[in-house]
Amino acid sequence: MQTAPDIQLPSLPEVTLRALEACHQEDSYRKISDIVSTDTALVTRVLAVANSALYGPATQLNSIDHALLRLGTHRFQTLLLTAALRQMLLELGADQWQQLRDFWRLSLTTALTARALATLTRYPEPDQAFMLGMLHNIGELLALKTPPGETRQYYLDHQCDIAAELVRSWGLGGMAEDAMRYQQALPAEIQDAGHLVKLISLATRLALADAAGIAAAGTVFGLSEDLTLEINRRIDREVTGVAESLGIPLNDDYKPAAAQHQLKQAVLEQTLVSQVLKMSPLDELGINALAETVNSLTLITGLQALCFGRTADGLALLSGTISDIPDLNITPNPASSVLTEAYIRQTSVHLADRNPTVLDRQLLSLLRSPSLLAIPIVTKAGCPGVFVLGTDKTSAAAAERIASLFTDEVASSLVRMETGHAHTGNSLDTELAQISLRRQLHEVTNPLTIIRQYIHQLRLRLDDTDLQNDLDVIREELDRAGDLLLRISRPDMVGDNGSPAYATLNHEILTLKELLEDGLFGEENKQLTTSLSQHDTGVAASPSTIRQILINLIRNAAESLVEGGQVTIKTSAPVWQNGRTWVELEISDNGGGIPENVRNVLFSPVATSKGNGHSGLGLSIVKQLIDDMEGSIACRTGNEGTVFRMLLPTAGNKKNDND
């Protein structure tokens, strides 16, 4: 029996609801991806669409992140809303809901275990292992929504083949297909199988947390019982944490009625808002466009409304759904009424039980209502206007939800009109574009780095000084090209006052690690590892400065590993020293150490014979950059390796901020 590659599967309403909320709140791409990745049904839908004919021949997907990037914001949000609509129609019995919750827990446990094992055993694609862990028992999910009978039993009896067939149809590769097909093979049968097959097979066993799984860990990867038990405990805590963040009970009876109701309400409200705004399209710029939307707001809330727009002098009443619109101009300061407070704070404000000001009383009289709700329209350029609705105590909460969705849509429309863009543009779009750009640049920088490594090795074999100098020039120009590409991959953010925004050290390290390790550490005997602080690592320096420091030190460390070895990057925060807080960066290697002739001039500019116009600055550039940010750098070197330790000032903690 063949399974369609684009299948519709049930999921827990809490996951779909949280993903919708994250999109509405414009959470980060990473946060949205993390939510979607916890649910097999959503993962299946994303992979099916990302590998469909819509995109033509495409490269193989090795993670859920890659699939989301291929979809883009608009298609993903449409997919999510469609999944939510189907979720509303899902009818399962009490026992089936319990089974669905248990299925969710097992699949997430398997996926997290697969990723942990991949990292532990140095499999190069841990996210791929996670993705396959989410898909491994998809036949059980198919059976759950199928009436009792032969078809249902077929799904239960052929889970491995079903998962393998779907993976094949999505073009995820032969190794991924084998991992699905042989997931239930005995541990002794897969000892010499491919790495991915062993990962998924062992993860499915460990997820059951029984003695057979612990024994299999020793057979397949030689893991000790203590280590295996610790992996199980850590994954169990992680699954519990994810469930709590999504509001999914794991220990009590699962009753989805409340979540289903919330999901239905969220879907209806979002659909209603998007459709009603189309009835009054914004086809002109300025406050006139804003004034036209108030009728739509009353239509979807059922409440009388007023629309105030920003003017040179403050706020002016532009329009409303009342019979007579007075000439009313408001000075926003002081912000004592619900209207002026919403405008200044750029957040919704209820009158509720507070004592109304004179302006509040005027608005209550105009709207002929017992209470008020003010909802600002907020864009990156500020607050162009505020809606005021007449409410009562029972309607205020529902009105705020719908009005907030509506004002967000209005704000997006105004931004599109001002910028001349025909399509929706938000922070998630920008983030997706930047991630996609970094992936493309990753493909470009890899061969540059490999060429640089070959030049370095060739130079060591040559005795001709002139040829060595020529190779140095070529390598320096490759460094320059590589640095330019890295700068393009993530332009510096600039604050309103023109000063560069702070850099997050951990983020810069992870970005560079992805870009550099395939080239500089592509050889099997060279490794790059990280040990990063779990606390904030924001530093008072631009991202380009931090990248320049990291690139210089990581390259030097990699080149010191003539016979192989390891480079380790470690961060610690906050670090207290000399009355100030710092972020500590440590880059170490276990190479042969720095030669004596270099140690004597370590941080000083030294002349070399690299050709005209090329000066041998060595580590002096790194030292100068750190001095400029009022940080410090120290070096310890010997026969067993070299360690560079830097203290970088935390963001907002520079000594001379007021100079």
Image (tube, rainbow, N blue to C red):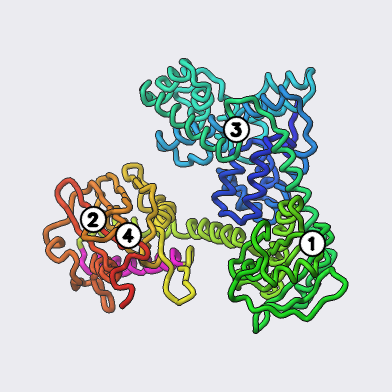
**Which residues lie in the magenta part?**
464-487
Looking at the image, residue 556 lies above or below residue 43? below
Quadrant of the image occupied by residue 419:
bottom right
Please name the residue that numbered disc 2 is placed on. Answer: 644
Residue 318 in picture, x, y percent from top left: 77, 76
Q: Report crowding for label 2: few under 14, some 14 to 19, many 20 or more residues within 10 A (C-alpha).
A: some
Q: Amino acid at mark 4?
A: Ile
Q: Amino acid at mark 2?
A: Phe
The residue lying furthest to the right in this view is 323
Residue 296 in picture, x, y percent from top left: 82, 64
| Marker disc for residue 455 | 4
Q: Amino acid at mark 1?
A: Ser
Say which of marks 3 and 1 sits in front.
1
Q: Amino acid at mark 3?
A: Glu
Residue 307 in picture, x, y percent from top left: 75, 71
Q: Earlier in the sequence, mark 2 or mark 1?
A: 1
